[in-house]
Image: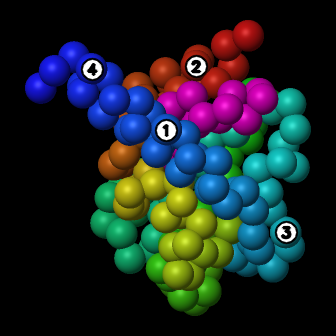
Amino acid sequence: MSLQRALLVVTALVFAASAAAATRRPIAGRDVETGKTVALSQYEGRPVLVNVWGSWCAPCNREAPLLAAFARANRAQIAVLGIDVTDSRAGARAWYRRYGRAYPSIWDPQALLAGDWTRGTPTTLVFDRKHRLVRTIEGAVTRAQLAAALREAIRP
């Protein structure tokens, strides 16, 4: 492949990625339990960690206690928000009873919102204070990944 052709391909890929990002739905919706509106924009000026999960997802269930503890321990530094995908309200509510309600979650039963931002569950999106996406963690998070994500999100 010639250098000119390679540059054209790279430019097309960058443009396609930028266009896809520009058409993403805002992270907002109704809370699984309360039905109240929850949105990333409600956390203006604060970093936010968004975790995409489902009660049916085994890795999501493995990471749930760690995420709940992280949310409680770091609530002064970072907000945590969930997106519950392809789930029933009963399944989501049972999940909350099992792991405790440490943060709100948007109910996304058809995974339309999550599909704009992720390739599957679990996925954790980390946004800085200006709500720029600074890190994506695919798969169940670890304590070390959460610590690194927090450092990156709160960096001035």
Mark 3 → mark 4, Cα distance in angstroms:
49 Å
Assign the magenta stretch its main secondary structure: strand
Relative side of 27 to 134, left or right: right
Mark on residue 15? 1
Q: Relative to 40, does residue 109 appear above or below in the rendering?
A: below
Relative side of 16 to 31, left or right: left
Which residue corresponds to mark 3?
A: 37
Q: Which residues are magenta?
A: 124-136
Q: Nearer the viewer, residue 36 or 90?
A: 36
Circle 4 or circle 1, nearest the eye? 4
Q: Residue at x 36, y 69 (%)?
A: 57
Which residue corresponds to mark 2?
A: 152
Task: Identify the mark nearer the N-term, 1 or 2.
Answer: 1
* Three-letter amino acid code of the residue under disc 1: Phe
Circle 3 or circle 1, nearest the eye? 1
Q: Residues within 10 Å of mark 2 (few under 14, many from 20)?
A: some
Q: Relative to 116, does residue 50 appear above or below in the rendering?
A: above
Mark 2 → mark 4, Cα distance in angstroms:
36 Å
- Residue 72 visible (yes or no): no
Circle 1 or circle 2, nearest the eye? 1
Mark 1 → mark 2, Cα distance in angstroms:
26 Å
Task: Identify the mark nearer the N-term, 2 or 4.
Answer: 4
